[in-house]
Every structure is written in structure tokens, then in C-alpha cells.
Image (cartoon, rainbow, N blue to C red):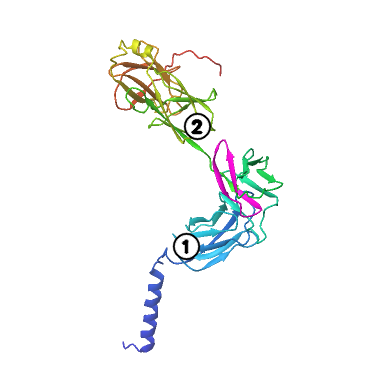
Amino acid sequence: MRLDYKHIIFYLMMLLWAGVTIAQPVVDISSPINVTGVVTDATNDEPCIGATVLVKGFRHKTCTGFNGEFSIEAGIGDTLVVDFMGCETTEKVVNGHPMKFRLLPPRFWCSRCRSISGWRGHALYGTVYNQNAKPLSGATVTSMPSGNKVLTDSNGHFDFTLIEKGDDSLKIEHPLYKPVQGPIDGLEFVIRLEQKIVTVKVIDGCDGEPLVGAFYQRDNSPMLNRSDLNGEFKLCAKEGAILTISYPGFLSKDVIVDSCDTITVALEVDKQTLDMFGLKEKNPIKLYQVLGTVVDENDEPLIGANVCVKGCDLGTLTDFEGHFSLKVPEGVVIEAKYYDYFSKDVQVEKNPMIIRLEHDDNCPILWGD
């Protein structure tokens, strides 16, 4: 049978249609997509109207509307940069989902530039926030160099009725935050303080090794906290706070927090501990730090289990993850005990230990159903 041009065109169209139908679409993550989002002020969750939103490394940009919303063309993996007066510039990577920006106030910012006639002789007011953009009460604001001071109220506000001639900077202080100082370049200020974190490192006064699982109490509070694998605590504490550092078998020590960011505390072995093991104080045998975990038959941690050296009173309790730490001579036997579980004796090892206790079905019940 002879095919004319109509048949040829028909077959070509069928082949083309089949190819289009079978072919799968290829997603190019670098191709622009329509990215939507909203920009709000972290201090009050109000929309930021007129904030600039741009794609980092490109020229195109847009502005937020009356609801703080925006829409811009960008590729997956591109970075959006949001800039708004009185807030820190914020960046986020595009992931294909609607984006939300909560803008924080900068650490030191004035909303009005100095006029040609100067600002001296005028009042000065502003607000102090913490690192989470929450108003910070009780902060001391000092006008320098005159030294005039005011305190922020419950809303974080401060107000100088008159700035003395010659004062050119503000200093803001709070016991739990890092101080900040900056120039007076206007009449209205927004200031953000970063929390002051103190690192306390606890070591063995004999060999200088870190004491893992050391306890600390702050100002005689009942709450106990433990040091990490580096023997360190990280806490927010004001200057003058008293920390009581303790470790099983060592003498406790009180430490006063000062202006330093890092404090090293060396604990000495309690003489009674040496007597327990029959060691002489002048020539003690090396004590090894024992780390371990107490768990049940299902490998669930047992919180508050008693772990002590067999035959003496030196011991400790497991924490919320079932962990414990002791410093003892090599080769001693430790005993793990927990209510309604069988106790277990274990030879001390240098490596982290896992002590698995079995439930005692015959243990009497102390409380009713």
C-alpha cells in the first residue's frame, strides 16, 4: 500500500504525541520559583511594612506590604536578605516553603540621626531588650562621661529628662547580661543585650584532669547540675553569685562569680576518701574516673539509682539519663542499687560501663494502686 503525505504527517504526529506523553518532567532546582513569606518585628510580632527583601548576589528585590508579606522570584538554595530600619539584617536560605522572618533589634541603634543644631540639652529615651527581643527590666543605663544613671522599668523603657553637655555615649549593664556601650547619635534608642554565659571548669587538684559529673549549686539553691565530659558547666550567672562545687570523695569549694567568662576550680581529695581505700595522703595511688550508666532490662535509664563503692560510703546517684561518675582506685568493686530491682556488683573498668539491673517481682510495694 502506498502512503501519501497525509499518512506520513499523521504517523509523525502520533510519534510526537507519544514522546511528549512518556517523557517525565525534569525539575531544575536552580530555576526561579515564586517565593512568598512574611516579615514581622520580634519585639511585638507586628508586620514590618516596607522591609526590603532581596536575593543575595542578585540585583532584583522587593518590599513587604501592609501585612508584612512579600513575593519574589528566587531559586532553591538561594539566600534571601531582609533589611528593615531599626532591626538587624537577617538571612535565610530558600527551601521552597513559605518563609517567615522575625527581625530582632540590633545591639545598639538610634532611630533619629543627630540634627545640625545638635541634640544636647534634650531628653533621651529608649528601650532595652534581651537577645530574644523581650523587654529587659532592671537594666542600668548610664550617660557617659557624666555618670548619670536610670533604670529600665517593667517594659524595658528608660528616660533621661536631660542629657548633660559633653555626654556622648550610653553604657547599659545588667547582672545577667554582657554590658554594651555606644555613641549617642540621636534622641531615641533601641538596645539589645546578649546574655552573659559563664563557663566553670572543674578539675582534680592532684592531676589536673577534668571531673565529669561534678555538681554545682547556686546561692544554696536546692537544684543540682552536673559538669559535662570536659568537666565544664555553662550557666548564666551575675557577678557576686556563689557557686558551691562538689564531687563524691572530694572537698567541696565555694566560688564567687567575677567578671571573667571562664573560671577554673580545682577540688582536693577528701582525706577520708584516702582512708577508705587505705591510701596514704603523701603517696596516694592514682584515682581513675569511672563513667557509667544504670539501665533496666529494656535499656531504659534508671534515674536516682544509688552507685557506691562496695564496703564504704563513697557513692553518688544517677542523673536523668541514668549516668553516674566516680573517681576510685582501679580494681575496686562498685554496687548499683535501685528500689524493686536486684542490686548488682561490678568490677570497675576504665571504659564507660553499662550496669543493667533486673526487676525484683517479690519486692514489697510501698504505695497503693
The amino acid at mark 1 is Lys
Q: Position of residue 299 (x, y in %)?
A: 39, 28
Question: How far apart are the two marked residues, 2 and 1, measured between alpha carbons?
Answer: 43 Å
Q: Residue furthest front?
A: 166
182 is within the stretch colored magenta: yes
Segment colored magenta? 169-190
Q: Across the whole image, how many numbered discs are drawn on residues?
A: 2
Q: Helix, strand, or loop for circle 2?
A: loop
Mark sitting earlier along the chain (2/1): 1
Q: Can the viewer see residue 214 in this picture?
A: yes
Is 61 left or right of 164, judged from the image as shown? left
Mark 2 surroundings within 10 Å by alpha-carbon count, few (fewer than 14), some (14 through 19), many (20 or more): some
Mark 1 surroundings within 10 Å by alpha-carbon count, few (fewer than 14), some (14 through 19), many (20 or more): some
Q: Position of residue 112 (x, y in %)?
A: 64, 57
Q: Position of residue 222 (x, y in %)?
A: 54, 23
Of the two numbered discs 2 and 1 in the rendering, the one whose residue sits closer to the viewer: 2
Q: Is residue 128 above or below residue 338?
A: below
Residue placed under numbered mark 2 in the picture = 258
Type of secondary structure dominating the magenta stretch = strand
Q: Is residue 203 above or below residue 86?
A: above
Q: Helix, strand, or loop for circle 1?
A: loop
Q: Is residue 263 above or below residue 168?
A: above
328 is within the stretch colored magenta: no
Residue placed under numbered mark 1 in the picture = 56
Q: 86 and 92: which one is in front?
A: 86
The amino acid at mark 2 is Asp
At 56% from the left and 66% from the top, the residue drawn is 62
Which of the image's four quarters has the C terminus?
top right
**Numbered mark located on residue 118 in the image:** none
Q: Residue furthest right?
A: 161
Q: Quadrant of residue 360?
A: top left
Which of the image's four quarters has the N terminus?
bottom left
